[in-house]
Image (cartoon, helix red, strand yellow):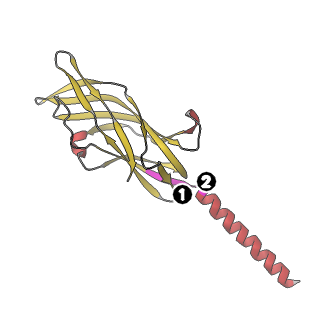
Amino acid sequence: MKTWKEVLTGLLIASVIIGGTYSYFAYGYGTLVVEIMDPPEHWGPASKVYIHYSAIMIHRADAGNESGWFTAVQSDGWIDLSEVLNVSKAIGQGSLQAGLYNLIRFNVTEAIIDVNGENKTATVESGMLNVPITRSGIQVKAGQTVYLVIDITPRVVGSEAQGFRVVPAARALPA
């Protein structure tokens, strides 16, 4: 009789440990660090491009359209793209439920460009960027930190007479 109690107690303890471990990895939270970089591209008439970004959201792969969006980074800010040529810079981080994420979106709300040593305001075309995450997405695991790099490639078009426009494009890849 004592042997059965020991076996049942052992099975109960093992079940609790296995269930707890599964719950932790399936429903726990991990950290996502979002970085940005700009390849050495020619920006058109501008020698520098500064962008103001905000509302960085990420989409969970197994969720529906609008229901699957979560805030990845709470803060917004300015970034000088000449500082991130071929090197990435962290622009924020957030806590996310463990899972696979396949899209990231953010706003480029304002842009300032340097043309012949003078700062000019440029309008931003399609300020909301929806960017697929390459390599089948990014897996956030409970208790771990993962990195996602937004590789932004803006193009400056127009002239002083017509006004300058920044046409942003980007791709996102797990680091």
Where is residue 7 drawn, in percent x and y? Answer: 79, 79
Q: SS for tag 2? A: helix
When asked about the image quadrant of residue 123, the answer is top left
Q: Are marks 1 and 2 in contact (CB under 8 Å)?
A: yes
Where is residue 175 drawn, in percent x and y? Answer: 37, 54
Q: Residue at x 28, y 39 (%)?
A: 79
Furthest-left residue in view?
116
| Segment colored magenta | 26-32
Height in image: 91 above or below 50?
Answer: below
Q: Which mark is residue 104?
A: none
Gap between marks 1 and 2 measured at Cα: 8 Å
Q: Residue at x 59, y 37 (%)?
A: 64
When asked about the image quadrant of residue 130, the answer is top left
Height in image: 46 above or below 25?
Answer: above
Three-letter amino acid code at the position of disc 1: Ala
Asked whether 119 or 59 is in front, the reply is 59
Q: Which mark is residue 142?
A: 1
Where is residue 129 drawn, in percent x and y? Answer: 40, 33
Q: SS for tag 1? A: loop
Relative side of 147 to 28, left or right: left
Q: Which residue is mark 2?
A: 27
Asked whether 149 or 9 is in front, the reply is 149
Mark sitting earlier along the chain (1/2): 2
Whether residue 63 appears in this view of the structure is: yes
